[in-house]
Image: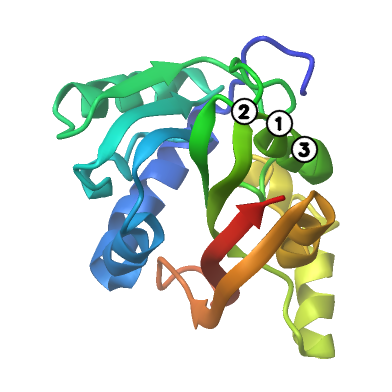
Amino acid sequence: MEAEETVRHPIAARLIERTMRAGEKRGQAEHRRRLLAGLSGRIVELGAGSGINFVYYPDKVTEVVAVEPEDYLRRQAEKAAATASVPVRVVHGVSGSLPLDAASCDAGVACLVLCTVPDQQRALAELARVIRPGGELRFYEHVVAHYRFEARLQRLADATIWPRLAGGCHRARDTAGAIEGAGFRIESCDRFSFTPSLLLPPDPHILGIARRQ
């Protein structure tokens, strides 16, 4: 998947977009505001999807480089960028090879994407490469449960057809541990249960800030 120049999940992409829009009404809008509050300078957003985050970027952001590999979602993001209140440049790219120079961004944003990347460590290594030393990584992700039974159910889902139906989504990743293992220091991290849709079970989510070492 990482070696491909284009990622195509046309059905999953449309389902994900609808789920994200529904999630806005269930509380995700506030999560996104918290995620992006206080950012400034040049930002890289990994897996920007349809551009649903663009309206939440604060005025002090000088540019958002929105990386999205999936064709349909990238087209939707380009439409969203045209009406964003901050400059947004939507680019094609995959998580394991971001089209940016080293240390060229003041911060990075990973929003409900580290569950889907084929290689989480590689994606985080790329974010660490393009974020300047001392810069921030803002993260909002669903993660593996602390409770053994719930975690077992998540891993069972990951071992079935679920990732294929959900565009590569994995429900049982220890994303906070992976962030720390990639050279970031977590400074704040809220953990809570949330589901964007009544049709999906709630998952533990984390929302926080990590600092590039």
Residue 120: percent from left, percent from top: 77, 44
Q: Is residue 204 visible?
A: yes
Residue that label 2 marks: 103
> Relative to residue 182, is residue 190 drawn left or right?
left
- Which residue is drawn at the image coordinates 65% and 66% (left, top)? 186
Of 149 and 122, the residue lying toward us: 122
Taking the view exactly as shown, the residue that stands out farthest to the top is 5
Percent x, y for residue 138? 51, 54
Q: What amino acid type is highlighted by mark number 2?
A: Ala
Give the SS element for disc 1. Answer: helix
What's the residue at 56%, 73% (across, down)?
A: 188
Q: Residues at badges 3 and 1 in contact (C-beta under 8 Å)?
A: yes
Q: Position of residue 26 (x, y in %)?
A: 30, 72
- Residue type indicated by callout 3: Ala
Position of 44 with respect to 160 (left or right) is left
In what quadrant of the picture does the N terminus appear?
A: top right
Coloration mode: rainbow
Number of numbered discs: 3
Contact (Cβ within 8 Å) of mark 1 with mark 2:
yes
Q: CA distance from mark 3 to mark 1?
A: 6 Å
Q: Indicate the amino acid at tag 1.
A: Arg
* C-alpha separation, residue under disc 1 versus residue under disc 2: 6 Å
Give the Cα distance between marks 3 and 2.
Answer: 12 Å
- The label shown at residue 129 is 1
Residue drawn where x is 42% and y is 22% of the image = 74
Where is residue 52? Give x, y as percent: 31, 43
- Which element carries disc 3, helix, strand or loop? helix
Q: Nearer the viewer, residue 190 or 185?
A: 185
Q: Which residue is mark 3?
A: 125
